[in-house]
Amino acid sequence: MPAFITFGRILFAVIFIASGANKFLDLGLAADAISNKVIPTLPAAVLPYTTQLEQFAGMELKQIMAIAVAALELIGGILIALNLGARFFALVMVLFVMAATFYFHDFWNLTGADAKAQMVNALKNLSLIGGLFMIAGIGKGPRLDGYGER
């Protein structure tokens, strides 16, 4: 049974690894999506800090956020696959997937085929959240002695 858990965890993490790698390969596209969906919703109280961050980093906020999101997905996926800090990163990824669902799969603001497509994506993300909670709950899995017994 532990082999199935390990194999399943590795296969599960592939979606985050691939998504993070794809964002790194096309940071412009990821930055534009973030610019259109996330940045306009930032509270006014945060804007002075974002300006300071942009000046410090020497790049626009959308680029900083695209790099951060790509790194989170890639590193979180790899560490979950390798079972290194899997509980912690699974819970971090729950928060990430919740935010991504809210900002990018807002079917409640759409109509027709777009609403249906985004609802499917939101439900897929809900399933991912369920899987992440299972990984957080299992952690490293049951401790076995040398004979495969608990």
Image (cartoon, helix red, strand yellow):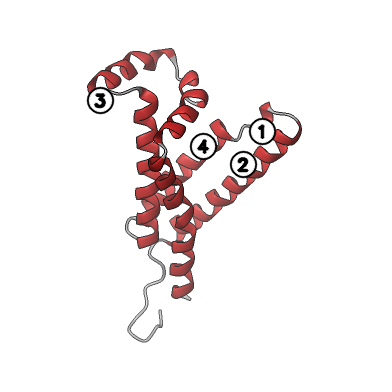
Residue that carries the numbered disc 1 in the rendered image: 107
Residue 135 in the image, given as x and y percentages of width and height: 46, 58
Residue that carries the numbered disc 4 in the rendered image: 100
**Are there few (<14), some (14-19), or many (20+) residues within 10 Å of tag 4?**
some
138 vs 99: above or below: below
Assign the C terminus to one quadrant of the image. bottom left
Q: Which mark is residue 122?
A: 2
Specify which label sits upstream in the sequence, 1 or 3: 3
Q: Nearer the viewer, mark 4 or mark 3?
A: 3
Outermost residue, bottom side: 147
Q: Quadrant of residue 49?
A: top left
Find the distance from the CA under tag 2 to the CA under tag 4: 9 Å
The residue under the point 41% across, 71% down is: 142
Residue nearest the viewer, comparing 128 with 39: 39
| Disc 1 + disc 2, Cβ < 8 Å | yes
Q: Nearer the viewer, mark 1 or mark 3?
A: 3
Residue that carries the numbered disc 3 in the rendered image: 57
Residue nearest the viewer, comparing 104 with 147: 104
**Are there few (<14), some (14-19), or many (20+) residues within 10 Å of tag 1?**
many
Residue 4 in the image, given as x and y percentages of width and height: 49, 72
139 vs 74: above or below: below
Residue 133 in the image, given as x and y percentages of width and height: 50, 53
Find the distance from the CA under tag 1 to the CA under tag 3: 34 Å
Q: Secondary structure at mark 2?
A: helix
